[in-house]
Image (cartoon, rainbow, N blue to C red):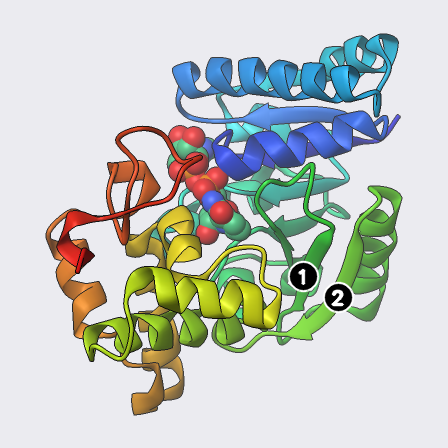
Amino acid sequence: MKTIAVIGAGTMGNGIAHVFAQKDFKVNLIDVNAAQLERALGTIAKNFERQVTKGTVTAEEKEKAIKQITPFQLIAEGVKDAFLVVEAATENTELKLNIFREMDAHAPANCILATNTSSISITKIAAATKRPQQVIGMHFMNPVPVMKLVEIINGYATAAEVTETIVALSKELGKTPCVVNDYPGFIANRILMPMINEAIYSLFEGVAGVEEIDTVMKLGMAHPMGPLQLADFIGLDVCLAILRVLHDGFGQPKYAPCPLLVNMVTAGKLGVKSGEGFYQYTAGSKELVVSKSFKK
Ligand SMILES: NC(=O)c1ccc[n+]([C@@H]2O[C@H](COP(=O)([O-])OP(=O)(O)OC[C@H]3O[C@@H](n4cnc5c(N)ncnc54)[C@H](O)[C@@H]3O)[C@@H](O)[C@H]2O)c1
């Protein structure tokens, strides 16, 4: 049985561990935070239980998959027998560079080092290691067990065989891989974030209200949720950080974040995670209630 290591047991890390364990990989799940590791194991068990209820996984498969996940707090311990490491730690450049230096020092020489980063340059991360040809972006979408796409990002030095291995592996997980090159925002966020920013500009300029903007995109373009609701789900701070990566990386004014987005983040209105963004989530996130700030 092949061993993979996942670094970071947050939202994405627990989903990535889940899909690999479900396909019979041995998973070493690593997080500096012991409480987070425990929470992640609980979330994974709950999500498998939901699949059993739906009939997509049997109770035996669930038990087997859960047993295949081992928690670790030290990177050195968790990566030493891995053929692949997928890093899904907090989105912070310095932190990721340090993690990659540590992975590089302790993972086997032929181990592929992948990152789930949404916006940090793969080429920059690769340059922190002595094996840049074995570093690649493996960008899963949230929620990982449900979303089909894996955006695979080739860094400047990524070797063709490494890309082929990650493409094959993504297919083995039942996902659809798309290979792209390493430029700011890759493809997913380069296209998504300007759309969200434009929706916020439309609200800021008074072209339409929150509900109208989201309804036009849902019913007119068949998007499952409107761009303002999606921004609330992603986190307005995350949207702002990615827009800044695009703006800095391309130096073009079209990526400048809308001042309303900047103000909302400064005021702590971050969307679902803070309880309010364009909508209000005091009563949960099932029913859409426009935030008082945007009620007409
Ligand atoms: N949340 C999303 O929708 C989403 C989607 C695609 C990609 N991503 C990317 O996935 C990555 C993880 O995002 P997330 O939303 O799961 O974050 P999160 O905050 O939920 O989890 C991050 C985890 O990393 C852990 N961590 C921090 N430093 C560490 C270290 N040195 N060693 C080991 N663990 C460490 C934290 O304890 C935390 O549990 C980021 O790069 C993010 O950009 C997120």
Residue 18, quarter of picture? top right
Report if residue 89 is visible in the image: no
> Can you name the residue that lies furthest to the bottom here?
252
Residue 138, quarter of picture? bottom right
Q: Would you say the residues marked 1 and 2 are in contact, meaning their CB atoms lie under 8 Å apart?
A: yes
Secondary structure beneath dot 1 equals: strand
Up-down: is 11 above or below 60? below
Q: Disc 1, ligand 1: is the CB inside 8 Å?
A: no
**Which of 85 and 39 lies nearest the eye of the viewer?**
39
> Can you name the residue that lies furthest to the front here?
296
Distance, label 1 to label 2, CA atoms, is 5 Å
Up-down: is 295 above or below 155? above
Give residue 151's mark.
Answer: 1
Which percent across, then down, holds residue 141?
A: 60, 50
Q: Give the residue number, with chain letter if any, for mark 2.
A: 178
Which percent across, then down, holds residue 134?
A: 70, 58
